[in-house]
Image (tube, grey):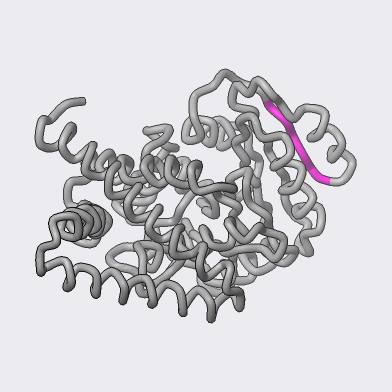
Amino acid sequence: MFFSIIIPLYNRPQEIKELLDTLVLQTYRNFEVLVIEDGSVNDAEQIVASFMDKLNLRYFKKVNEGQGFTRNFGFQHAKGDYFIIFDSDCLIPANYLEIVNNALAVNYLDAYGGPDGAHASFTPTQKAISYSMTSPFTTGGIRGNKKGIGQFHPRSFNMGVSRQVVEKVGGFIITRLGEDIEYSIRIHTAGFKIGLIADAIVYHKRRTNFVQFFKQLHFFGRARINISKFFPQELKAVHFFPAVFTVGVILAIIFNLLQWQVALLANVILLVFILLIFFHAWWKNKSLKIAFLSIVAAFTQLTAYGIGFMQDFWKRIILNRS
């Protein structure tokens, strides 16, 4: 199978270098790479040019439209049978394409997603963020998991779609705010087969500090409401969990300030949650530092998502504003 790897890029030249370095090492060689600069001010033209003799590589520049529409641009120019989408902040294991090719040969999927994890080279903060985003004690536990709730929705940091899907369903119709989930719902609705390739892992850097992580997850919370405007049935009870958690934390603070007796119960619940995160992260990463940072990451993830979710739930569902 001939793969077309599509990578939107916006002002991240160093990231694309690290990503292309990993693609050079792929054991499966039947692929091309399309790097699409989405209106970047700090472009990566010279860096990409240094890989032209190492990869079947094409480089494009276009006006800024966001990642969804930039991927559509890649679909239009791709030559492959199957299109694979990566975010520019990913590192790809050397056997990734071999794993995907073999998996599709045994159990063909019209679209697939894969999980993400932390690379050994990541900082402790990045590893803590990666833990939080994949932990069974946060909403990360329903991502990249065959036991996830409802239909599996591939995420665009690690997603593949066949040419037939693009020809029938088209591309992304929103460029950000949950565009990948909206796209996978349309693919499923059109009757195509979607699934998880559990071994097709990528190492996703995400954000390098908790301020950036908060902003990203606040955006994700808003994105869930945006998806519900297209598919109301996709807003499920589990998606309210971060908002409930956020309200619970706020109430716990108020109860303690007012010295109400119910504060004891709230503190016990939060302590149990903290201990679960700490010991599980310690077991997973074999590091006390990452375990402590994982507590910060989990609270950042849930409260940021919860605030973004509640903000747009109020504006776009209760007040019905655009």
Residue 109 screen position, x and y as percent: 48, 63
Residue 131 screen position, x and y as percent: 50, 65
Query: Could you say which quadrant of the image residue 152 lies in?
Result: bottom left
**Quadrant of the frame with the N terminus:** bottom right
- Residue 83 visible from this viewpoint: no
Q: Magenta segment, principal secondary structure?
A: strand
Query: Could you say which quadrant of the image residue 139 lies in?
Result: bottom left
Question: In the drawing, does residue 150 fall left or right of residue 87?
Answer: left
Q: Would you place residue 280 above or below residue 255 in this image? A: below
- Residue 77 visible from this viewpoint: yes
Which residue corresponds to the image point at 38% horizontal and 40% vertical from the top-left? 219
Query: What stretch of residues is rendered in magenta?
Result: 55-60
Q: Would you place residue 117 above or below residue 187 in this image? A: below
Asked if the magenta segment contains residue 232, the reply would be: no
Residue 230 screen position, x and y as percent: 24, 40
Question: In the drawing, does residue 179 fall left or right of residue 114?
Answer: left
